[in-house]
């Protein structure tokens, strides 16, 4: 949700600021530190993760400012002491951020984001960073699986009514990055330049005195290239009316209920019999990647996806964590038996066969004297500069560039890695010892 002031500073957990207050009091706040975002495991049933939300994270960090409204709220609720309030008044992140660009695949242990700065300026970003990356990466993975299952057919994101209003905009953005063709969400279209689509719901047909009247009205307004929703009453009669009114040049029909596979086949036969051989068939209604895959052999030209997409299709979080891994150049790590992490700043290389197929993800230490892995002729580094000295780095990819990155990345996975069934990650993560 956007703040009334435009600031992202209070989109956080209270303990970020109480830790800050304690560190300022005891003098540890200004120690140089490195925090790392990674996931220990992929959600159940997933073979790969998709980095999503990096661009939104950079915007959010730029707007992480404590104006008068934010400071007054903290003062009124006594979350922190006066000295901490004064420190926050001048807060600007001045550190460095490196990370995987959006659209890059990731696996367990991948160092998705590396944040370097003082403890004080980096710790307060934890909740904000994780809330964006966990949400957007979950949507990105679900969307990528759906796009793969659709096998090149048109995909429309239409989940705005099934999630928070701001989450809907973020989901539309990331679905487009993952390969969706368009969104129904107009704010996403305005904010990110994403193509928008939409025609009519059942309510419009019910509003009119007859289905014929509804179709005639829609065509008069939107033209014969529109998409007519034909399943309000009887689908067979609806298709007949649609072609009768629009002619054989009707753009598309949409089926939103029933056994859409069987109905799509029947609709194709009927349309062809009426001479509307170029009229497309769009289906919607509780679709996920499994339903889309099951429809691959049917004469479906496009899919409208809502609830499953905006909820991550059963995996609403990417399970990422933001952990302190280095203090004053010294590796630190949590040793809990259930939540282990590896200390020290890290980066990663992905190795590829000559054919372009990915083989493994190599994670290595970045430290004075530590040896980097030797790159093979087809290998590449994964992290890129995102923020330098508090400012967005030059050359951060655009949404369109990230969209192409993901399209290419999916082609590099071993074919087993694209299966929708349960299994191991598509490629292993190897931790390179210096």
Image (cartoon, rainbow, N blue to C red):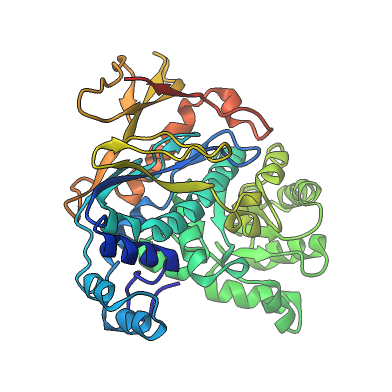
Counting from the top left corner in percent of width and height, residue 280 is at 62, 51
381 left or right, relative to 302 = left
Count the labels in the image.
0
Quarter holding the C terminus is top left
345 or 5, which is in the foreground?
A: 345
419 left or right, relative to 196 = right
The quarter holding residue 304 reads bottom right
User: For the point 50% across and 55% down, which residue is it?
Assistant: 135
| 373 versus 237 height, above or below | above
The quarter holding residue 421 reads top right
Residue 382 visible in the snapshot: no
User: For the point 56% across and 51% down, which residue is it?
Assistant: 317
268 left or right, relative to 301 = right
Quarter holding the N terminus is bottom left
Counting from the top left corner in percent of width and height, residue 284 is at 68, 57
Counting from the top left corner in percent of width and height, residue 282 is at 65, 54
Counting from the top left corner in percent of width and height, residue 375 is at 29, 17
User: For the point 56% across and 67% down, which residue is it?
Assistant: 160
| 63 versus 356 height, above or below | below
Residue 399 visible in the snapshot: yes
223 or 202, which is in the foreground?
A: 202
288 or 268, which is in the foreground?
A: 288
| 208 versus 340 height, above or below | below
| 78 versus 114 height, above or below | below
């Amino acid at each position: 949700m956007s703040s009334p002031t435009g600031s992202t500073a209070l989109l956080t957990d209270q303990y970020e600021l109480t830790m800050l207050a304690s560190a300022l009091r005891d003098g540890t706040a200004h120690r140089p530190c490195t925090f790392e975002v990674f996931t220990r495991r992929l959600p159940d049933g997933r073979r790969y993760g998709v980095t999503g939300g990096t661009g939104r994270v950079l915007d959010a960090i730029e707007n992480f400012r404590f104006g008068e409204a934010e400071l007054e709220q903290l003062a009124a609720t006594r979350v922190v002491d006066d000295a901490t309030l004064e420190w926050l008044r001048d807060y600007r992140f001045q550190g460095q951020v490196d990370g995987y660009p959006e659209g890059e695949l990731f696996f367990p242990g991948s160092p998705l984001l590396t944040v370097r700065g003082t403890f004080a300026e980096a710790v307060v970003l934890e909740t904000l960073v994780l809330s964006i990356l966990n949400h957007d990466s979950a949507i990105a993975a679900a969307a990528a699986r759906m796009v793969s299952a659709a096998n090149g057919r048109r995909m429309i994101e239409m989940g705005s009514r099934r999630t928070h209003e701001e989450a809907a905009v973020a989901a539309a953005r990331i679905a487009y990055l993952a390969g969706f063709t368009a969104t129904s969400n107009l704010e996403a279209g305005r904010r990110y330049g994403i193509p928008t689509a939409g025609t009519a719901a059942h309510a419009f047909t019910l509003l009119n005195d007859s289905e014929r009247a509804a179709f005639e009205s829609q065509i008069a307004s939107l033209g014969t290239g529109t998409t007519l929703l034909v399943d309000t009453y009887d689908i067979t009669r609806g298709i007949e009316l649609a072609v009768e009114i629009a002619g054989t040049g009707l753009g598309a029909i949409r089926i939103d209920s029933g056994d859409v596979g069987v109905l799509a086949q029947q609709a194709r036969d009927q349309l062809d019999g009426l001479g509307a051989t170029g009229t497309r068939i769009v289906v919607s209604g509780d679709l996920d990647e499994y339903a889309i895959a099951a429809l691959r052999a049917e004469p479906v030209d496009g899919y409208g996806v809502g609830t499953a997409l905006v909820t991550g299709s059963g995996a609403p979080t990417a399970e990422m964590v933001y952990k302190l891994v280095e203090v004053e150049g010294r590796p630190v790590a949590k040793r809990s038996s259930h939540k282990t992490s590896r200390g020290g700043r890290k980066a990663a290389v992905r190795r590829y066969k000559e054919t372009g197929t990915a083989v493994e993800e190599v994670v290595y230490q970045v430290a004075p004297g530590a040896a980097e892995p030797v790159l093979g002729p087809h290998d590449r580094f994964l992290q890129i500069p995102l923020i330098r000295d508090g400012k967005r780095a030059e050359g951060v990819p655009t949404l369109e560039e990230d969209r192409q990155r993901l399209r290419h990345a999916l082609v590099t996975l071993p074919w087993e890695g694209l299966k929708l069934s349960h299994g191991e990650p598509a490629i292993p993560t190897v931790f390179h010892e210096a």
